[in-house]
Amino acid sequence: MATLRVCAGVALSLAVLCTSERSNVVAREATGSLTGRVHVIAHPARRLATAGAYPGRTVGIQGERESSELDNVVVFVSSPMPASSSPQRVTIRQTNEEFIPHVVAVTTGSTVEFPNDDLIFHNVFSLSRAATFDLGRYPRNASKARTFTKPGVIKVFCHLHSHMSAIVRVFAHSYFVVPSRDGRFTIPSVPAGRLDVTAWHERAGEVTHQTTVADGTAAELTFSLPLTDPE
Amino acid sequence: MTAVATSRSPRLLVKVLCFAFAVIACVIVAVFVLFSWQTNARLTRTVVENMEASQRRFAGIDARLRREHTLQAMALAENPTLKAAVDTYYSERGNEHELGQLRSTIETELTKLQEIMAVPALSVTDVRGVVLASAGPSKADWPAGARVQLRVEENGAPVETVVLRNGHPYTATAVPLVLGRDVVGEFFLASPLDDAYAANLANEARADIAILLGNRVIASSTPAALRRALEGVALPLSGTIVLGEDEFVVQRLSSVDSANVYALDSVAAASRTASSETGWVLLFASVGALLMAVGGSWWVARTVARPIDRLSNSLATMAKARDFDRPLPPTGGSRELDTLTTTFNELRTAVSLAEAESEATYLGVIGALATALDARDPYTAGHSQRVADLSVAIGRKMELSEADLETLRLGALLHDIGKIGVSDAVLRKPTKLTADEFEQIKLHPTLGARILKPLRFLDAQLAIVELHHERPDGRGYPYGLKGDAIPMFARIVHVADAFDAMTSARAYRGALPVAAAMSELWRLIGIDFDAQVVQAMAALPIALTEPAPGEQAAEADRPASRALVQFPKRAAAGTAQHAQLALRRAE
């Protein structure tokens, strides 16, 4: 098992090296960009559970944010792309019993920090296949970090506050972006050619459009994410 | 004998006792019946009210329990592992292995919760209502992958749903699993609506429980017969209903969709025990009252009957003893009885007065008869009266009672009544009597007795009249009785008669002086006269006083009543001979 893992790790790093080399070649050859807009269509009739068991503690979810759902959208190239890793260090703060931001997108190898800003203890854990972990409980001003090596959707929760959740999307390439507050997005330096581009939201699911990126041009895309009940 | 006894009227005591008791007993029985009827009615009312109150109370408790149950479910729905697992489930779609792992995570968590909650079934569904995992004894009805349609919330609060799973009715409370602002799934608790559920509820409610789906009984804690009776019956929300032969207090405890849970209480069963208890108490009280009524009636009967008894007894005694002289004692029983006694006494007085009057009349007549007899012979005029007076004087000296003196007086007055039957020729013959004539004279005591015999009130005097010529030596007539065989009254009258005869003048002789007569009496003691009587006679003032010879003529015509103090003039001459003569005549 251990041998298998080591092998996988070696293969992966080799692949990463190869793809970065190849992308440099492609970049040199022909690149364009992806630009467009994401519309999150009206939050569904789902309402907040106001009659929750811990009504006084749900401070974090009380302030309604304008177009906040756009922060939870990730637009990315879903066609097979050469792997490229640019490890970053991002932070998801635990503030007012809420993970902020709710969604982060990183490349493999990136590390996410989870500092606790609240007066109370928090916990960070995940049951997701891509990264199953439990950082344990820690107090205010303490911080724990986790490096994500496998691409996937990692749902993060707090064992102490069941209403808290965050999502870490890990990609094996860097062709992804979280749209700005007005829904606009730009993914620069995308290899030219036919590409599948997907807009993803944890509840609305995915919407994928195919586009052709010509060298030196920007392909325009518009996504409408219906944030309705999956039913 | 028995015929006489039955024909006789019953005793007053018994009669009064029966009447008094019958009346009281009727009243007591009526009161008992009325009271027990009313008590039963009130008891039933109270039982119904109590049941309604307790059912309402339990309905309140049940509602609160359900609310708490819901709150508990909501608290459990905050379980972070459940939420995390369900939420992660979405992002792992397509990877069956991973999903299985997550399902078993959920199931493990649910099993832990089930141990805390002890609910028949605990399940988690995704937002589409597909069961992810279940726990609890009834989990077979809620398998993973099954689709359930549960109402989750209404007006922000969890609600119950009644659903059929594999033909088993369940009541389920679903709570959303909320993550942030999103519902990621549902968490619900389900209980089968079966007889065990009803029995459990019945145990808590202390009443029977019936669970109806529409008009169909799906579960109950009631006996089969009642369950059949409930089938198809529209039960009221709250109130009473007659099922079979029994009345029930009904209260709807809860209602979910078309399923209704009712509490049922049999009025008869509850009131039967209560009414039998009060019935016994009432019965005891009534029996006690009846016993007291017997005593009371006895007392009343005695109070009423006793004075009457007493009165009738004294009357009976009086009648038996023929003693009407004493008045009846007052009974003191009542004014009416006292009036009766007084009236009787007045009547008795009036009757005895009338009796005395008629006796006096008789005596007057007899006296007149005696006077008439005396009047036939001028020489014997006033004789009967004088003998009577003298006899009484002797009797008094002998210390006889007043009643005896009265008997003596009458007897003496009538002693010669028999002479009515002696012809005037013999009686008034101035010369010496022949033997035949003397025999005629000797008949007069018997004759007198025969005349007086029919007059019952002169019974006591009969002996005096009949025996006043008997002598102590047995040579008297008519029977020749001796000494003590002759009654004392007869002896007294004999002496008085002889004395008066001796001291009175006759056609054929003069009157003897008192002293001569006395000496003659003394001389013939034991022969002709009784010694005791003569001694008493001798002590009398007339026997000692010798009047002056001059007065005698004047005194001769005085009334007979005064004869005792007068002495014939002729009595002064030849004593012994005179006395002899006088005695002979008197005989």
Image: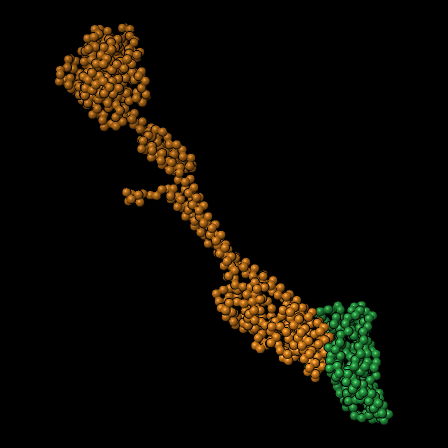
Chain colours: A green, B orange
Rendered location of residue B161, percent (x, y): 62, 74
Of the pair B210 and A104, the residue shown nearer to us: A104
> In the rendered image, is residue B384 in sight?
no
Dividing the picture into quarters, in which one does residue B2 lie? Answer: top left
Of the pair B522 and B83, the residue shown nearer to us: B83
Rendered location of residue B582, percent (x, y): 20, 12
User: Does B550 sit left or right of A196 as displayed?
Assistant: left
Q: Residue furthest right?
A: A28
Rendered location of residue B122, percent (x, y): 64, 73
Of the pair B587 and A210, the residue shown nearer to us: A210
Dividing the picture into quarters, in which one does residue A221 lie? Answer: bottom right
Task: Identify which residue is drawn at 24% across, 6% down.
Answer: B572
Relative to B337, say whether A91 is above or below: below
Dividing the picture into quarters, in which one does residue B410 lie? Answer: top left
- Image quarter where the C terminus of chain A lies is bottom right
Relative to B342, say whether A100 is above or below: below
Of the pair A62 and A84, the residue shown nearer to us: A84
Q: Residue furthest front?
A: A3
User: Does A97 sit left or right of B433 as displayed?
Assistant: right
Task: Identify which residue is drawn at 18% across, 22% down.
Answer: B421
- Image quarter where the N terminus of chain A lies is bottom right
Task: Identify which residue is drawn at 70% across, 74% down.
Answer: B82
Rendered location of residue A169, percent (x, y): 78, 81
Relative to B44, say whether A77 is above or below: below
User: Does B312 sit left or right of B366 as displayed?
Assistant: right
> In the rendered image, is residue B246 in sight?
yes
Task: Identify which residue is drawn at 75% across, 70% down.
Answer: A160
